[in-house]
Image (cartoon, rainbow, N blue to C red):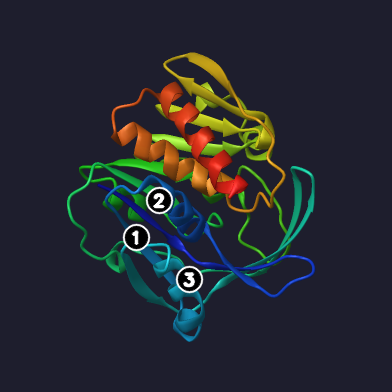
Amino acid sequence: MIALVGNFSRDHLPGGPPKVGGGVYHGARALQRLRVPARIVARCAEADRAELVPPLARLGTPVRYVPGTSTASFSFVYDGDRRTMAVESLGDVWAPGDLPALPPFRWLHVAPLARHEFPAATLASLARGRRLSFDGQGLVRAPELGPLRLDADFDPEVLRYIWVLKLAEEEAEILGDPAALGVREVVITHGSRGSTVYVGGACEFVPAHPVAADPTGAGDAYSVAYVVARNAGFSPVGAARRATAVVAAMLAR
């Protein structure tokens, strides 16, 4: 069994109404295809619960809702793989006491939407007896409204608790040499071109084939598929290949 924890978001794309988003939702899209035992812990403002929780629950993975006071909101514009984002509102901060009891599991993916959401003390609590996968948005996304701004002003203490760090290409550029981060496994995604896995002082590129579809959430789905594969005994590179195939199938659908 694996678990997935994070805030919902409300996503605004051109030409349509707002959509449910966040790593918990897009990760659940991958879990729907993989059909493995999992649990999701998701949070948003209580006023938005009736709007955001049912679409997640319909994907089939059991969901534990944690009441919140704020819902993250973003606007997106895409030019191929390149995305321009603006932050319209921020999600809640998770304290150790906000975490519900969960069944035993080996892997947990933490899906922050900005740097403030999961401080080091919370990650320390989540990491007890578990391996944490962490989305690099939680290191480099400045928690402020307006055009999305990336910087490296994160607390280095959080890296102590991370087993797998998933970075988008632009996030990796901010952080520099992946080997210098001290994380066991670093995976950098390159959009439709594939991903690069850094582990044990070596790196390997895993190619992908472009899929003509809305790529929103592809990185979240990749992270969850990677964790599922690692939990099943795949090597890091094998897990990256498996995750690439899962995301391609999800987008094609």
Q: Position of residue 119 (x, y in %)?
A: 42, 55
Residue drawn 42% across the image and 68% down it: 58
Q: Are marks 1 and 2 in contact (CB under 8 Å)?
A: yes
The answer to which of 46 and 239 lies nearer the viewer is 239
Callout 2 secondary element: helix
Residue drawn 25% across the image and 66% down it: 100
Please determine whether, in this image, residue 249 is positioned above or below residue 145.
Answer: above
Residue drawn 30% across the image and 35% down it: 231
Determine the image quadrant of residue 209. top right
Determine the image quadrant of residue 148. bottom right
As drawn, the label of residue 180 is: none
* Lateral position of residue 106 relative to residue 119, left or right: left
As drawn, the label of residue 31 is: 2
Please determine whether, in this image, residue 125 is positioned above or below residue 166.
Answer: below
**Extreme left residue here?**
104
Callout 3 secondary element: helix
Q: Position of residue 187 (x, y in %)?
A: 52, 31
Q: Work out whether mark 3 precedes mark 2 in sequence or the reverse, and give the earlier one.
A: 2
Q: Position of residue 150 (x, y in %)?
A: 68, 48
Q: Work out whether mark 3 precedes mark 1 in sequence or the reverse, and give the earlier one.
A: 3
**Three-letter amino acid code at the position of disc 2:** Leu
Residue under label 3 = 55
The answer to which of 4 and 92 lies nearer the viewer is 4
Dot 2 alpha-carbon crowd within 10 angstroms: few under 14, some 14 to 19, many 20 or more: many
Q: Position of residue 62 (x, y in %)?
A: 31, 64
As drawn, the label of residue 61 is: 1
Q: Work out whether mark 1 precedes mark 2 in sequence or the reverse, and give the earlier one.
A: 2
